[in-house]
Structures are given as C-alpha cells and as structure tokens.
Amino acid sequence: MQVVGMELPRKDDIVTARDIGVVGCQRCTKVWPLGTTRCTRCGARVISRDRLAYQRVWAWWLVGLICYIPANLYPMLETRTLIASQADTIIGGVLTLMGHGSYGVALVIFVASVLIPVGKFLAIAFLAISAQRGTRSPSLQRMGLYEIVEYIGRWSMIDVFVVAILSALVQLNALATVTPGPAALFFGMSVIFTMLSAQSFDARLIWDAERR
C-alpha cells in the first residue's frame, strides 16, 4: 500500500514526523512540511532535530550542580533574637524541625530541597546519556520521566518560598528577625539552571535512540 509515494510502515514500527515529511513547532505544536524554517503562527524557529541540545543540556546541568553545592553548605535561614542568633543550612533546618516535633514540615522541606533536586540531576543526566549512547530502557518510560522532570521543576522552589514568607512575616524589630541566608540565592539559581537544562533537552531524540 502506498501513500504519497511512500510505503506505510508496519504496525509495530516506530514512525516519526520526519518519516512522513512533517515537522512540529516546539512552541505551539503546529505541524508544518519538512523544511519549514519559521512557524508563521508563533514566529518560533522550526527545526526537526536540535543537535546542539546536548551541549546546552550539559552546560545548564553543570552550572546548576555547581550552584547546588554552596546551597547546601551555606545557611538558608538566619534567625536573630534578643539573646541569640541561629543560622541553619537546609539539612540543619530539617534536623531542627524534627527536634521540635514538626516531622511533617521537615519531610516536605527534605523532599523539596534534597530528594527532588538530586533526583532531577540524576534524571536529566540519564535522559541525556541514554539519548546519546542508547539504552535498553523503553522510550515510553523515558518520555514519562522527562514529563515528570518538566512538571515538578517549579515545585523545587518551595524552600525559597518558605524562606521568603518567613522573612516577610517575622520582622519584630529588635525582638526577632528572620532573613534569607546566602544559600537561598544559590538554591534558587540551581533550580532555574536545572529547569533550563530540562527545557533544552530535545525529547524527540529519545525516539531516535530507540531506532538505533
């Protein structure tokens, strides 16, 4: 059976847009004939495969990892009262909350500030390496992992949000003040860079790796 001079692939074959002569805009998802360079709907550049995606992914990933290190070494929150002052790192703050019996809050902070960022670093690295070198992991599962990384990226800022809210609420002049520590800046930068790394990844390369 022929369609526009092309033989239809078998049911179990992986068919890409490039195989049938079309390309999708990455911004608005409109489909154009292969060879189109500019989407007239949104104005974005249309490209079938972004071969420079790997360089951008690893560049943003590395910068994000570098920022994440001081984010865990420097204080995230600095509290000053009439009689004492205290500066807590992310892990130190989790331990302090647990010491006061706030296990639920401590768990949320630990998951949002440690487990999710570390998981994102590992997931992005796995996706990039598997797309470059190939893997036995099914493409559908890797695509699901990519969508999860994209979705949870914004929620990694919860620790910074907590610090900002506390800083705004607890301002009792000489009695007590809460201010963000230097780790808050590094943590926020780390989250932004990992989001840029995930967004730089061309998910279409996942399916290309399946066909090797």
Image: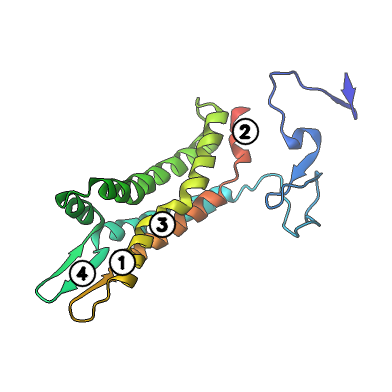
Amino acid type of the residue that numbered disc 2 sits on in the rendered structure: Trp
Q: Residue flagged by tag 4: what amino acid is it?
A: Thr
CA distance separating discs 3 and 1: 14 Å
Query: Label 4: which residue?
Result: 79
Residue at x-position 47% and y-position 53%: 154
Between 22 and 42, the one lying in front of the other is 42
Q: Which mark's residue is nearer the viewer, 4 or 1? A: 1
Callout 2 secondary element: helix
User: Which of the two discs, 2 and 3, labels the residue nearer the N terminus?
Assistant: 3
Instruction: Establish if 128 lies above or below 69.
Output: above
Mark 4 or mark 3: name the one nearer the start of the chain.
4
Q: Kindly identify the residue that appears in the image at 23 percent across and 52 percent down.
A: 94
Q: Which residue is mark 3?
A: 157
Above/below status of 20 relative to 75: above
In terms of sequence position, does the residue under pointer 3 or pointer 1 come before the other?
3
User: Which residue is tagged 2?
Assistant: 207
Task: Look at the image and tell me in which quarter the C terminus lies.
Answer: top right
Q: Nearer the viewer, mark 2 or mark 3?
A: 3
User: Badge 4: how crowded within 10 Å, few (<14), some, or many (20+)?
Assistant: some
**Residue located beneath label 1 in the image:** 166
- Label 4 vs label 3: CA separation? 20 Å
Give the foreground label among 1 and 2: 1
Q: Is the residue 108 above or below the residue 8 in the image?
A: below
Q: In terms of sequence position, does the residue under pointer 4 or pointer 1 come before the other?
A: 4
Tell me whether the residue at label 2 lies in contact with that at label 4, contact meaning CB atoms closer than 8 angstroms.
no
